Image (tube, rainbow, N blue to C red):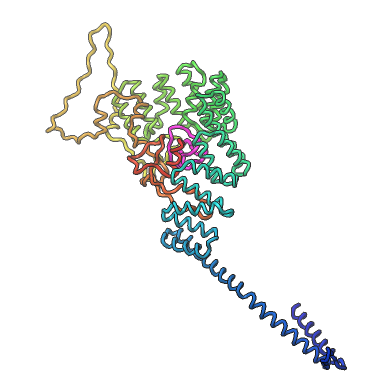
Amino acid sequence: MLRIVLFLVLIALAAAGAAWVADQPGDLVLTAGGFRLSTTLPRFVFLLGLFAAAVVLVWSILTTIWRTPGRLRRRRHDKRHARGRQAITRGLLAIGHGDTALARRHAEAARRHAPNDPLALLLHAQSAQLEGNRDEAQRVFRVMAEREDTRLLGLRGLFIEAQRADDAVGAVMIAEEAIKLSPSSTWASHAVLGFRCARGDWSGALAILDSNLSAGLIDKPAYRRQRGVLLTARALELETMDRDVARESVMEAIKLAPTLVPAAVLAAKFESEAHQVRRAMKLVEAAWLANPHPDLADAYAHVKLGDSSRQRLQRVETLAAKTSADKPGHVEGQLAIARAAIDASEFARAREVLAPYVNDPTQRVALLMAEIERAEHGDSGRARAWTLRAVRGRHDPAWTADGYVSDRWRPVSPVTGRLDAFQWQAPVASLPSDKGTTIESSAFEEAMLAAPPPKRVTAAPSEGPAELPAAAPEPLPAAQDNSPPMTTEETAVATPEPVQPAAEAAESSPPAATPVFRSRADLGRPAAAPIPAVIPIVRAPDDPGIDDEGPSDEFTEQIGTPKAQAGGWRGFWSRWGA
C-alpha cells in the first residue's frame, strides 16, 4: 500500500513539473562561436532528457560488453563447482553402499571439477581405502595434512593407516602432533593415552589425563576414577622395584577410587605390613561392599600375619556378612567361606555353604567340591567326577573388557585402548540361554556323585590284618556284555589314577574350555570380524582397519586354531605389550 501511494505521489510531481515547464513563456538561445541555437524551454527539456537516456543506454552497453568475459568465467566456474558437488554427493553415497567402481568414477569427476574442495579430497581418500589402495590413501591424507582446513582430518587418516600397517612409532608421532594442533581432539588424546599405558609410561599417561580435564573432555568424577586407575597400575608395576613410590601411588589411588579392587588389595597389603590391621580391614570392607571379589576376601583373610586357618575362616565369615542390601548372601562371600573352611579342614561347613550351588555348579564350585571329596574322604572317583563337571561347567566371573577375558586386572582394554574397561563379571557365553542350559551331566557322573563315599578301613593294632573289602565282580566276557560302550569321559572316571589337585586340574583343562567371549550376538561367528575400511564422514576416522588376523593376547585362550595372526587394534596393542 505504501509503495502505491509513493508511486502516485511521484507521478503527480512529474505531471506538475511538466505542466510548469509547459507554461513557461519565452525562448532559450544557445550561442557558441558562430553557432546559434534558439528553442523553447519545453523542447529543450525534452531534448535534454533524450540525450541523458542515450548516454545511459550507451554506458550500459559498454559496461555489459566489458563485464561479459568475467561473467562467463564465473558461470563456467559455478557449473564446474556444481558438477563437483554433485559428484562428491554421489560418490559418498556410492561409498555408503559399497560400490567401489562408482565411487572411484565420481571421485575422479570430483577431482576434475573441484580439485581444491576438501570433500573432494576426502572422497578420493575414501574411495582408495574402499579399493584397498593404501598407498594412494596415504598420499591423499598427506595432501590433506598439509592444508590448513583439513590438517587434523589428514592426520587422523594417516594415524589409521599407520595402525593398519602396524607402524606403532608412526601412529604415536601422528597422534602427538594432532594433540599439539588440537588439545581437545578426543581421538588423539585417547590414542596417546592408550599408547602410553601400553608402554608403561604412567607419568605421561597422567599428564594426558590432566590435559583432558583442562580441555573439558572428561568431567571431574571420571577424572578421579581414571587417575586412580593409572596410579594403581603404576603401583602394581613398582611393587617389587620401588615399594616407597608404589605405596605412595596406591594410597593416592585408594583415596580417588576407594571401590577399585586391585587398589584396595594392594593398599591393604601395605597397611598390613605396616601393622595397620584395622585400617587395612576398612579399606577391604569398603571395596567389598561395592564389588565382592575373591582377591578382597583373600586379602581380608591374611590381613593379620600369623593367624591360624580357623581364625582366617572366622574373619572371612565376618567379611561375607558385610554385604550390601542389594547383594545379600553374595556368591563370592559363600565361595570365600568354602575356601577358608577347606583350608581349616572344616569340610562340613564348606559343604553347607556350597549346597545351594551344587545343582548347577560353576567351575569354581565344582573344583571346590572335588577338593572336598579328595581331602575329606580320599574318594578319587567322586573327585574326578566333580573335576569333569568343572571342565564343562559354567564360567565364573572374570576380568572382562570388550569381549576379552583376562586372568588379572589391567588398566586398559587390549581391544580399544579404553581406560578402566575391565569389569568383574561373568563372560557372555556362560550366561544361560533362552532355551535353557545346554550342559548336562552324564548319567555316569550323576551315579558317581550320588554314590556314598567309600569307608576307610583301618586295622586295629592288637588284631591281625584288617579284612580287605570284597573284591569287585569280574567283568563279563565281551560276548556277554550287552551294556553300551563307555564314553571317553566315563573311561577316564573309571580308570584308577592319581587325582590332580583342583588348581592343577584347572590348569590342565583343555584350552578350548576358556574361549574368548565377545557378545551373545558374536557366538558361532569367527573371532576376527571384518571392519569397514572407510573412515567415517560425520566424525573424524578412528577405524582400526580390516582385521585379517585373530586375537593374539597372552592372557586369553583361543578356541581352536586361529586363521591368521592378529592385526588391526589387536595386533597393534599386542606389539606394545598391552
Q: Is residue 273 above or below residue 294?
A: above
* The N terminus - image quarter: bottom right
**362 or 415, which is in the foreground?**
415
- Residue at 77% across, 80% down: 6
- Determine if the magenta segment contains residue 566: no
**226 or 201, which is in the foreground?**
201
Q: Position of residue 206 (x, y in %)?
A: 57, 35
Q: Kindly report the secondary structure that dominates the magenta region of the rendered protein.
A: loop
| Residue 563 appears in the rendering | yes
Q: Quadrant of residue 208?
A: top right
Task: State left or right for residue 474 relative to residue 99.
Answer: left
**525 or 319, which is in the foreground?**
525
Q: Position of residue 537 (x, y in %)?
A: 51, 55
> Which residues are the magenta region?
400-424
Q: Is residue 464 above or below residue 99?
A: above
Q: Quadrant of residue 346?
A: top left
Q: Is residue 474 above or below residue 201?
A: above
Residue, far front = 34
**316 or 196, which is in the foreground?**
196
